[in-house]
Image (cartoon, rainbow, N blue to C red):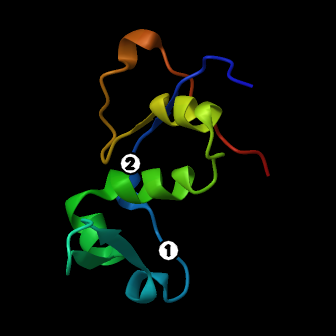
Amino acid sequence: MDTGDHVVVINASKVSLSGRKAQDKKYFHHTMYPGGATWTSIVELMEKHPERVVERAVRGMVPRTRLGRAMMKKLKIYAGAEHPHAAQQPVAWVPRG
């Protein structure tokens, strides 16, 4: 159900991976041209665009439907602690436990 709530993720550059994921995990991309296959390691992606690592992880968990696309539009990810959504008065969420 789409409730209209937006989610703001900050400090995406501080994501840590367990085990050997930092060395072993690679992302695949193809330009659809012959020979256009590229593999990007997660270390390279964390250096250039850390917010894309979190975005791809979340995108893999949402449904591949209109609802999932609407949910992804409401996800805002920032590498640092600063974000332009202070006027909306976001509430910090702290997991219990």
Residue with the most extreme front position: 34
Nearer to the camera, 59 or 30: 30
Q: Secondary structure at mark 2?
A: loop
User: Image check: 91 left or right of 53?
Assistant: right
Q: Label 2: few (<14), some or many (≥20) within 10 Å?
A: some
Residue with the most extreme right position: 97
Mark carried by residue 11: 2
x and y, in percent, of residue 3 in the image: 68, 18
| Residue where numbered disc 1 is placed | 17
Q: Label 1: few (<14), some or many (≥20) within 10 Å?
A: few
- The answer to whether residue 50 is above or below residue 4 is below
- Choose the circle earlier in sequence order: 2 or 1: 2
Q: Residue at x 55, y 86 (%)?
A: 19
Nearer to the camera, 6 or 9: 6
The answer to which image quadrant residue 38 occupies is bottom left
- The answer to whether residue 3 is above or below residue 95 is above
Q: Amino acid at mark 2?
A: Asn
x and y, in percent, of residue 95 in the image: 70, 45
User: Image check: 34 left or right of 83?
Assistant: left
The answer to which image quadrant residue 52 occupies is bottom left
Find the distance from the CA under tag 2 to the CA under tag 1: 14 Å
x and y, in percent, of residue 6 in the image: 53, 24
Residue with the most extreme top position: 87
- Callout 2–callout 1 Cβ contact below 8 Å: no
Q: Amino acid at mark 1?
A: Leu
Q: Quadrant of the N terminus?
A: top right
Mark carried by residue 75: none
Q: Residue at x 39, y 52 (%)?
A: 12
Nearer to the camera, 64 or 9: 64
Q: Secondary structure at mark 1?
A: loop
x and y, in percent, of residue 78 in the image: 34, 41
